[in-house]
Amino acid sequence: MNHSSSTTGKLRDIMKEVERISPDVTLKLNDSIVSTIYGDAERITRKVVSQKSKPRVDWDKKLDDVLTSRTLGIPMMLLLLALVFWITVTGANYPSTVLATVLFWGQDRLTDLCAWLGAPAWVKGFFVEGIYRCVAWVVSVMLPPMAIFFPCFTLLEDLGYLPRVAFNLDYLFKKAGAHGKQSLTMTMGFGCNAAGVIACRIIESPRERLIAMLTNNFVPCNGRFPTLIALAGILVMGTAYSLGAAVIVMGIVLFGIAVTLAVSRALSATLLKGVPSSFTLELPPYRKPRVGRVIIRSIYDRTLFVLGRAVCVAAPAGAVTWLLANIYVGDLSVLSHCANWLNPFGTLLGMDGFILMAFILGLPANEIVLPILIMSYLATGSMVEMDSIEALRRLFVVEHGWTWLTVLCTMLFSLLHYPCGTTLWTIRRESGSVKWTALAALIPLGVACAVCFVIALAARQAGWV
Amino acid sequence: MDLINRLFRRMDANEESARKSNNQKTSYIIALAGNPNTGKSTIFNALTGLRQHTGNWPGKTVLRAEGSCSYRGMTFNLVDLPGTYSLLSNSAEEQVARDYLCFSKPDATVVVLDATCLERNLNLALQVLEITSKAVICVNLVDEAKRKGIEINTASLSEELGVPVVPTAAREGHGLGKLLSAITGVATGSVVNAPYTVKYEKKIEDAVVKVEPHIRKLVGEEFNSRWLALRFLEHDQTVISAVQKWTEERVPLKIKAGGVALA
Amino acid sequence: MESNKEIYQSRETVYLYNLPVGKSAVVTSLNAGGITRRRMMDLGLVPGTEVEALRYSPFKDPRAFKIRGTVIALRKEEGCQVLVEYKGE
C-alpha cells in the first residue's frame, strides 16, 4: 500500500512539474511536434526517394475522371450496379436449372430408396420432401447467383471502388446526419448484413455507429438477392428477361438506399440526435484486381461460407415447415391454420398469409424464405416439380393467384423487413444493448409494413389490380 | 557526419552468441503497424497463411487480428494493428495501435510503408521509432512504385532510420523471406538498432530534459520514458491515465485487452 | 524559378475547400482546435504543406485533394478550417 501511494505521489509530482513547464501551451506544443516529425519525414524522403520517370498514363486520374466525375459519377455507379445484376441474372439462370434438375433427380432416387426400404410415408415425407427438398432448393436457387455476384462484388472491392462510392454519396449521408463511413458499411452489407454491422466499428462516434447498424438491413444481403432476382424474374418474362430483372432489382436496391438515408435522417433527428462528426476519407490508388485469385477466394471464403450457413438453417427449417404442413388439426394443417390467420394482415400488405408465414419462419436466415414459401405452397397444391423460373411463375401466379402487386410487395417486404437472426445477434453483441437490438428489428419491420400497406392501398384504390 | 554523431550501430552478432542468449526463448510477439492501405493485411496473411480476403478500402482492420507463423524453429505470433496515419490523435484505431506498441511491448514491430508515398508513411514510422527501437521497416508495394517511376534507396533509408529496411511486393510474395530474417534478427536481439530520434525545437527538448528523469524514476526501464515525457507535456489524458492505472495497480499495462472499447 | 516579386503580387488566400480544381497551394494555417486540428495535422495538413485540389464529388461536397502523395476527401466543414495560399491568375 505504502509503495503504491508513494508512486501515485510521484505521478502527481510529475504532473505538477509538467504544469509548471508548459502552462496552456499544449496546442502549440502539439503543432510543433507534428510539424517537426513531418519535417523530418520530408527531409529523409528527399534523401532516399528519386522519381526516375513519370508514368505515361496516370490511370488513377483517368479512372477517377469517370468513376467520381461530377456528371458521370452517379450514372456510372448505377451502370456498374446494373451490370453486376445483369451478369448475375443472366449467368445464374442456366446453372440454376441444371442444379435443380440434378438435385430433384436425387429426390426421385431418394424416394425410390424409401420405397425399396419399405419406409413409412411420414419418413419419406419428413426427410425427402421436408429436409432434402428445402436444402436442394436453397442450393439450386442460391448457389449460382452467389457464385457470380460475390466475385463481381469482390473485384470492385479489390479495384478500390468502394471508397469512391463513399465519395460519391457522402453528401447524402451528411445531409442524413450520418457518418461518411456509413456508405462503406452499407456497401459491405450487400455481401452480408452481419459483416456490414461488424464493419460499423470503423465509425467512432457511438451515435453514428448505431445509426449505421440500425439501417444496415435496408440494403439486400446475399441471402436476399436470389429471392429478389427470382421474384423479379416472375415479373418479366420473354426476351428482355435478364435486362428487365436486372433493372427491377436495381430499382429495389436504390429504394433500399433511399430508405437507409430517410431512416438515418429520422433517427438523427429523434432517437439519436446530433450533428455529423468530422470526417475525412482516403481514396486509395486503384489496384489491378487479381482476377483468378479473387474468384477462387470469394467463392471459397464467402460463397461457400454463406451457402454452408444457409444449408445448416435450411435443413431444420425444411423439417419444421414439413411438420407444420403435415400435422393436421381438424381438416387443415397447422401451416394452413397459421396462414389463414395471417391472411387478412397479409392481404392488407399486398401479400398473403403463406408469404408472411414464410418470412416469420425465415427469421434464422433470409435465404430460406423463398424455399419455405415454395414448400408450403407445394404442400397445399398439386405441383411437384420445381425446376425453373417458369415453374415458379406457374406456382405463384397460376396456382396461388399472385399479381404484380403481390410480387412487388413481397420484394419490398424482403428488402425492408427485420434482419436475419445472425445479424440481430451481431447487433446485440456489437451494441451491447437489448433495446437497440429490438429497435434494429422493429424499425425495419415498421417501415416494411408501412411501405407495403401504402403501396397495396394505393394500387387497389387506383384500380390497378 | 550526422550519421557518425548519431552513433549508428548495427551489430550482426555471430550466430553462436545469438543462439546462446536465446536458447530458452523460441516464441516471439511481432506487431504489424502501418498507414491504412499499405498492404499490411496482405503481409499478415502471407506470413500467417491465413487467407481472409483483404479489401482495398481504408479501415478494414479495426480490431487487431492475430495469427502465427513458424520460421527456423521459432514461432512468431503476429498482431495486425489497425492502419493509422499517426499515433497521436486518439482515434479508436490509433489508441489500439499506440497502446499495444507502448504498453504490450512486442518483441519486434514491423512498420509497413507504402513505397508510392513514402513521406506520409515515414511520419508514422518515425513515431513508431520514438516508442520502440525493436523495429523493422518494410517498404511494401515497391512493384507499384517502380511502375510509377519511383525508386527508393532502401540501404540509405536503413542508414537514416537506424533500423533494418526490407523492400517487399507482398501481393506477389516478393521479399517476405528477407523480411522474416530481418524480424528474426531484431526479435532475438542479434541485431541491435539505433533508431532515428526526432529532435524537437529547443523549448520542447528543454522541457523533456526536465520531465523525463522523473518519469524514468516512476516507470524504470519498463516503458519508453522520453516518449511518455512528450505525451505528458502534451497533456495526453489517455496516456496519463494509463500510466496512473499502472502505478496504482503495478500490473503490466495492458489496455483494453479486446482492442477498441465499443461505447 | 519565380521571382519573389511575382509571387507576392499574385498570392491569394482561400479556404482549402474553395481552392479551384487543378490548383496547387500551400497550407498557411488551421482554424480548427482540439482533436479535429490534430487529426487534420496527422493527415499531413501542417503549415507549409503543398496541396492540390483534384476534383469535386457529384454533389460538389466532399472534395478530393492530393495531400502528401495521398488522395484525401474533405467535407465542407473540414475543408473550410484550412487556409491555403496560392498563386492566382
Image (spheres, coloured by chain):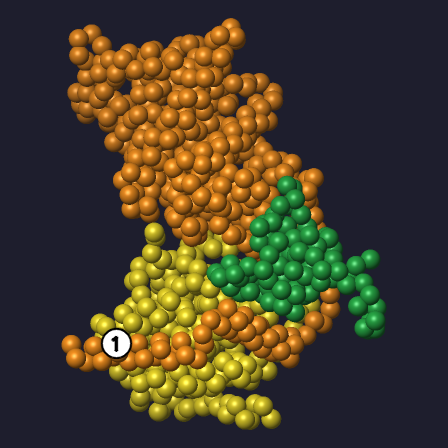
A143 is higher (above) or lower (below) than C78:
above
Residue A348 in view (yes/no): yes
Give residue C77's position: percent from left, percent from top: 57, 50
Give residue B167's position: percent from left, percent from top: 55, 73
Quarter occupied by residue A194: top left
Identified at 55% across, 19% down, the residue is A236
Give residue A243's position: percent from left, percent from top: 59, 27
Front residue (pair A134, A215): A215
The answer to whether residue A15 is left or right of residue B173 is left
The answer to whether residue A11 is left or right of residue A2 is right
Residue A152 in view (yes/no): no
Q: To which chain does the residue with label 1 belong? A: A
Letter of the chain shown yellow in the rendering: B
Identified at 49% across, 72% down, the residue is A25
Check disc 1 and report the residue beneath it. Answer: A8
Identified at 62% across, 36% down, the residue is A79
Give residue B116's position: percent from left, percent from top: 61, 66
Instruction: Check the picture and name the quadrant holding the N terminus of chain A.
Output: bottom left
Letter of the chain shown orange in the rendering: A
The local secondary structure at tag 1 comes to helix
The answer to whether residue A371 is left or right of residue B153 is left
A298 is higher (above) or lower (below) than B139:
above
Q: Colour of chain C?
A: green
Q: Residues within 10 Å of mark 1 (few under 14, many from 20)?
A: some
A37 is higher (above) or lower (below) than A83:
below
Identified at 72% across, 72% down, the residue is A52
Quarter occupied by residue A311: top left
